[in-house]
Image (spheres, rainbow, N blue to C red):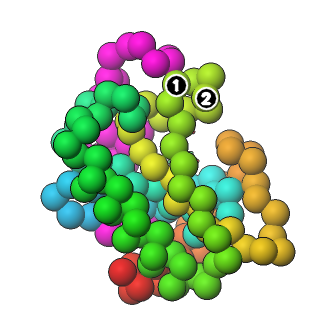
Amino acid sequence: MSLAGDYDSANIFAKILRGEAPCVKIFEDDNVLAFMDIFPQSQGHCLVIPKDTTARNLMEFPADRLGVLFAAVQKLSNAVVKALSCDGVIVTQFNGAPAGQTVFHLHVHVIPRFANLPLQPHHGGKPADMAVLREQASRIAAAL
Ligand code: AMP
């Protein structure tokens, strides 16, 4: 699937939002859910997804909801810096398979960077230890 196509309500993030698949949650409110990426590119790699949408990518998302989504991204980025004492933060998102998108529900990556640690490639991360993810999520949540 690329830029053109219909929203697939069986995508993994839709299942997470419906409670049909698990996630390591950091926070949620009426508008967004933030959770840990299970194939992290770095320690603390997390994702923010909007609720109540069938936008597969940035271009399909209503412009008047972008502020709320990116306010949550900023809030999560601040918490990541505070909780993990990282040296930088990558905020990114991918639109369409040729751009690297694999899950077709709009999402934003928040990826902490540490000065002396390499960044794993997008889709090159190893499956995370769930206990480690839960510990990181609770530290990030405590820093919100
Ligand atoms: P993208 O390639 O931009 O579509 O990003 C999808 C991201 O979702 C990747 O970084 C995956 O590691 C991550 N991912 C896939 N399935 C799950 C899941 N069940 N829970 C958390 N993260 C996931």
Residue 99 image label: 2
Q: Tell me which amino acid carries mark 1.
A: Gly
Task: For the residues labelled 2 and 1, say whether their Cβ atoms are less than 8 Å apart.
Answer: yes
Q: Is residue 141 magenta?
A: no
Circle 1 sits on which residue? 96
Q: Is residue 66 left or right of residue 88?
A: left
Residue 23: give x, y in percent of width and height.
Answer: 41, 58
Q: Residue at x 23, y 35 (%)?
A: 62
Q: Which residues are magenta?
A: 1-27
Residue 66: give x, y in percent of width and height.
Answer: 29, 47
In the depicted structure, whether residue 80 falls above or below residue 130: below
In the depicted structure, whether residue 34 falls above or below residue 122: below
Q: Which structural element holds mark 2?
A: helix
Q: Nearer the viewer, residue 53 or 8?
A: 53
Residue 86: give x, y in percent of width and height.
Answer: 64, 78
Q: Nearer the viewer, residue 133 or 102?
A: 102
Q: Residue at x 64, y 71 (%)?
A: 88
Q: Is residue 63 left or right of residue 30?
A: right
Q: Residue at x 54, y 36 (%)?
A: 94
**Residue lying furthest top in this view?**
4
Q: Is residue 29 visible?
A: yes
Residue 76 sits in quarter: bottom left
Q: Label 2 vs label 1: CA separation?
A: 5 Å
In the depicted structure, whether residue 51 falls above or below residue 132: above
